[in-house]
Amino acid sequence: MGSSLPHYDQSQRVGNCRGSRFCVPRSHFWFRECEQQQALCSQCSVAMCSSTCGFHQCHLGLAIMWPVASQCVGGSTGFQHLPPAALPAVPRPLALPCAAASLRAGYSSHVEVESTSFVRNIFNGQLVPTNVFPFPSALTEEETQSLQTLLHPCTRFFEEVNNPAANEKLESIEEATLAGLKDLGAFGLQVPVELGGTGLKNSQVRSLLARALCRWGCILSVEGTAASRCCCPDPPAARRLARATVGARRGTTRHVWSRLRPLPQYARVVDPEQKEKYTCPIASGEAVAAFCLTEPTSGSDAASIRTVADLSPCGRFYTLNGEKIWISNGGIAEIFTVFAKTPIKVETGEMKERISAFIVERAFGGVTSGPPEKKMGIKCSNTAQVHFDNVKVPAENLLGGLGKGFKVAMNILNNGRFGMVSALAGTMRGVIVKAADHAANRTQFGDKISNYGAIQEKIARMAMLHYVTESMAYVLSANMDMKVPDYKLEAAISKIFASEAAWHVTDEVIQVLGGMGYMQEAGIEKIMRDLRIFRIFEGTNDILRLFVALTGVQYAGSCLKNLQKRLMSPLGNVRAVLREVGWRAKRKVGISSGFSLQGLVHSDLNSSAVQLTTAVDLLGEAVESLLLTLGARLPDKQFHLKRVADAAIDMYAMAVVLSRASRALTLKLVSAEHEKLLCRTWCQEAYERVKANLRAVKSSTWNQSCSNMKLISHAVVQNKGVYTTHPLDICRDPAL
């Protein structure tokens, strides 16, 4: 059945249905993907798709197959049905308490019932492959060629003009380098051409960042492509570029990226005059921008900021007062995106404080900066405190609407994470070159160290971590270019994975190089210092893990609550409800729900695909069990949420490498067999981690260990240090 479906041919559409791709098998049924409600089932007159995206299963036991000439709303194609199939036995409904879905997750007060997000749906035990399979690409041939024309001048610039050693020593960027960046148009990569920018897509910026822009600084190396032959017509040149720039150009990327981050918001300002006033000078490099969110009392908890903006009685301006810390470009910026609390009247008529965003110019007066911070890494990125003292901000400089600042901030951070992931993939590609070269040439105990298992395991794991990170980067950027509406969990997971993978890979490279890796001459120690910040800024990985878990669990809870409502409604689609209850019950007792990736994954990877679909069942069952057991207490169970998030991260990693390796095998790329090995090995190990994490959250032994860790932590904190007696019993007081 699956063999009749062509791989990666996205040209076959269903009428005007823009989102249709492949029939996706689930058990003995077939489903049809679609973004719009485009057609009715000719057998039962049930709409095939929801208003967003979904699947239709004919309640007569028939199932949708590949389109054939027939009839479609808005088009001229229809659907063919398979012969009737017996429905599975439906168990009795489960008791689903409403409290289970009433989570106190502060990230969103509204949870969508439907989503195309791969990650969001796996928390509900559902497999929605649309955004991941087949491996997405949003670039046309013309856009790929356009990207290639940018690579050569960027390469020459960083080889001939930029001096990373001087930048590091100066703890700033040389004027010649900044002037060259302006000439290259580096500050307006994603700004529309009509506003003075280059107008690149996310996928183009992804390649450019990974191959060349990463050389500018803290994001280190280069290249980071989904496969050198995927986007780069000259793979050897790309590899030379990677080797030539490993460990180079810290800090400049952070400087450039800090300028770029507010631009998407400025570009959306309705007033054309505002667009021209702010976007154009930043895109040209004439003005420097900064993003001001963090405060002394507000780190991960952005809602606790204390900077305030009060509207004047005349309504013409806001008076801004407050302090921001650790602001990239804070000491040199002329334009700031500032977040402050503003009073706003809510529906009840009460006045509440809500976060709003403002465009603030240093020229307004009252804006001062502290000296540059002394940092562990990214030293040539200017980082400083910024103070706002009675700054008069014109009312028209309100960004995104009154009280909408938190959404603006999250959008900027969310969009910014895609650049980080690809750049980190480029960093890993570069340092792996160092490790491979050393292992191939270093002889110890009469043999090349590359022939020893201990080194082989390190290098193999480096390659797998890089492969996953690079795959995540290109799936994410392509999703953004395709205007996928919900990708925030995928972006958060990609940031978590990339920052931790890059740290681990670089640490292992030092280990492979031994004493040489520890020396400054090798350049790896500088990369380590620069990399450390990536697990902290743009949302700490610890907070992002909780965000992923809470958002996913909240979505699963909303689906459970919705199911309960449908169970109680006599007018609902009883068969559809009972089917959902049926697969939930089967999953509860360890029977597969029947999800399949047949037709989307290459046949050589079927066993890995089964591991992923089984993992989806396991996560769905575990989350449902936690909801039913802990209910509203679940948001406070961070030990549990971390394990659930880790399982979701591994599963998303499995999905992106399955998609990418399937593409390589189908297109018969030179690296196809190698990619198959990477994929199979990663999926096997990730599947075992998923099972271990999900077993743990339901294990009484593991729960006792969590309770013990709470007591241990409490004792250490109360004692303000380690609370154990000295082994030599020198002092009776454990505190000493």
Image: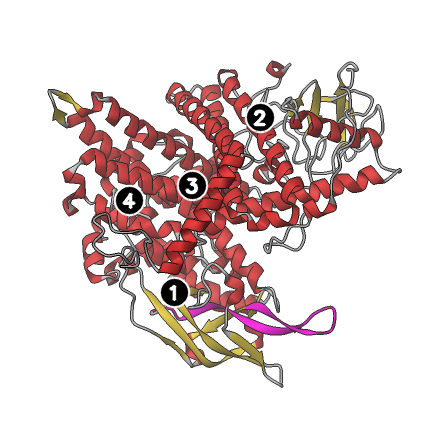
Name the residue located 29 percent from the left edge and 58 percent from the top edge.
733
**Within 10 angstroms of label 4, few (less than 14), some, or many (20 or more) residues?**
some
Name the residue carrying label 2: 613
Q: Which residues are magenta?
A: 332-356
Nearer to us: label 4 or label 3 = 3
Looking at the image, what colour scheme do you see? secondary structure
Residue at the image position 51 percent from the left and 29 percent from the top: 691
Alpha carbon distance from label 3 to label 2: 21 Å
- Is residue 276 visible to us here? yes
The structure residue drawn at horizontal position 35% and vertical position 55%, both measured from the top left corner, is 254
- Mark 3 vs mark 2: which is more N-terminal? 3
Judging from the image, what secondary structure is the residue with disc 3 in? helix
Q: Earlier in the sequence, mark 2 or mark 1?
A: 1
Q: Are marks 3 and 2 in contact (CB under 8 Å)?
A: no
Indicate which disc, 1 or 3, sits on the residue closer to the N terminus: 1
Which residue does the numbered mark 3 point to in the structure image? Answer: 497
